[in-house]
Amino acid sequence: MRRSCLPKCRFGRIMGWLQILLGGLVIIVSISSLFKFYSAGFFWRNEDICRHFYGVRNEYEGFDIKALSDRVGEVLNKLDSLQEKLESAVQQMEKNKDVFHATNITKLEFKKYLEEEVIRPLYSAHISLRLIRLPFPEGIRNSTMKEEPLINTFVIEEIRKYITPKESRIGKINIFGTERIYNTIGHACVLYKKELEEYMNYDIGSYCDDDWNLAQKLMFNGCDPLPRRRCLTRASQVYQKPYPINESLWKLPDDRNVRWSNYQCRNFQCLMSNNTKRGYLKCVGCFEMEKEKLKWMIKNSSLPVDFLISEILAIKPGEIRIGLDYGVGTGTFAARMRENNVTVVSTALNLGAPFNEMIALRGLVPLYITLNQRLPFFDNVMDLIHTAGFLDGWIDLLLLDFILFDWDRVLRPGGLLWIDRFFCNKKDLDDFMYMFLQLRYKKHKWAITPKSKDEVYFSAVLEKPPRAI
């Protein structure tokens, strides 16, 4: 009997130990799984996990909550301001009720007060709330974008209409291969919201305010490009027919063809260099045609940095046909090049004087552009880029780097870069030399000469090398 029990007892023990081992393994696996779940955050409130496992989507993902909050805050501020103003008016009436009883306020005055102090602020706050654009849960049309860019940043209706993308009327992809056309504004426009809304606050189809100086201020501060406007540009009320091209190049234009309201001067004679109240500092003497005629034609000094147009054109005979003059001036360089059958576009900013109007009235092409903006030309199209009197030692090196590479993009292989009388401090010369030499252009002319004790002039004519790939 004992012999027959031994095998059975031995088998039972083995099974018992096996169950213990399997149980222990289950406990270890369970503890390990619980630890992983804990590490993953399953025992905490986690919206991402819930959305992942239960298909719950965040409707506000990609939505500009800050802009929405700013607009609501703006409306609340308007309502608070209105409430304070009305309470102050009531308290003032209570203090002076004896005088108020003796005063006969007309219905017209009371109506004007209600319109200006009550109705308009309430209407503005009402419109601000109505214009808040809420997110689209399914995205906008075929995209996953929850809202139109910047739509809740501005309140003025014209800005909102401008930045809202425009779809094809036939519901198909347009000729540019896109579903929508996005009108562009400079990214810094959101920092100058008040000024931009003032600029865009007009009656559609009526005359624009004479506010080009406000527009230029916005451009300088990075709100560039500006939005288009749907109002009529003002012009001089006594505008005269411009002079014919054989006269206009070297003759001061008619004073009546310029709007002078935003300048210190009121005529071209006032802009002469001998007038200390002319209103501008750059390009002094640019409006004196007799002096302008001598530029780039004869050397007025013995300085080696003064190059003549004839010398530059001789470097590439017959190859210089179109170019860009990047600087501040009245178009004299373009006028001289035109006499040599070269078409030159001149950049211009109205820095205290009507430089754009002057260039156009001479029969030349002004390009109203700031340093902030990429040149509106395609790659490898210009034969010549000339710069004088604008990019000097004040400019930030990183900004200059971007500008130089943009010039390189526009300049064709074999095209010429003419740096004309660039000046800087002596201690900064090496830094600027590196900037100009980094593109590995071929040197045709190169000259450095003292300007003063601490400053130097630098001029060069460089040729863009071929970069065939």
Image (cartoon, helix red, strand yellow):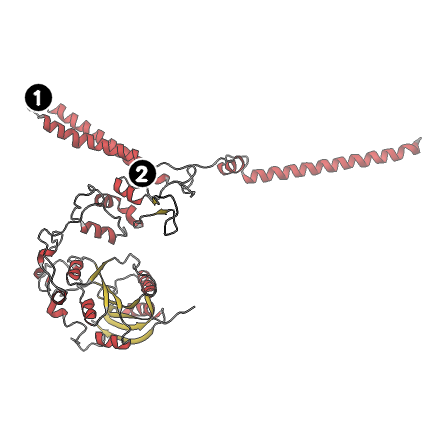
Question: Disc 2 residue type?
Answer: Asp
Q: Residues within 10 Å of mark 1 (few under 14, many from 20)?
A: few
Question: Disc 1 residue type?
Answer: His
**Residue 211 shown left or right of residue 153 in the figure:** left
Q: Position of residue 377 (x, y in %)?
A: 30, 61
Q: Position of residue 70 (x, y in %)?
A: 31, 38
The residue at which mark 1 appears reads as: 101
Of residue 249 and residue 65, the one placed in the foreground of this image is: 249
Q: In the rendered image, which quarter contains the N terminus?
A: top right
Secondary structure at badge 2 equals helix
Q: Quadrant of residue 16?
A: top right
Q: Is residue 397 above or below residue 122?
A: below
Of residue 360 and residue 177, the one placed in the foreground of this image is: 177
Give the number of the mark in front: 1 or 2. 2
Q: Quadrant of residue 170?
A: top left
Q: Position of residue 212 (x, y in %)?
A: 18, 51
Residue sitting at x 36%, y 36%:
134
**Residue 396 shown left or right of residue 285 in the figure:** right
Residue sitting at x 60%, y 39%:
35
Q: Is residue 432 above or below residue 202?
A: below
Residue sitting at x 24%, y 34%:
124
The residue at which mark 2 appears reads as: 70
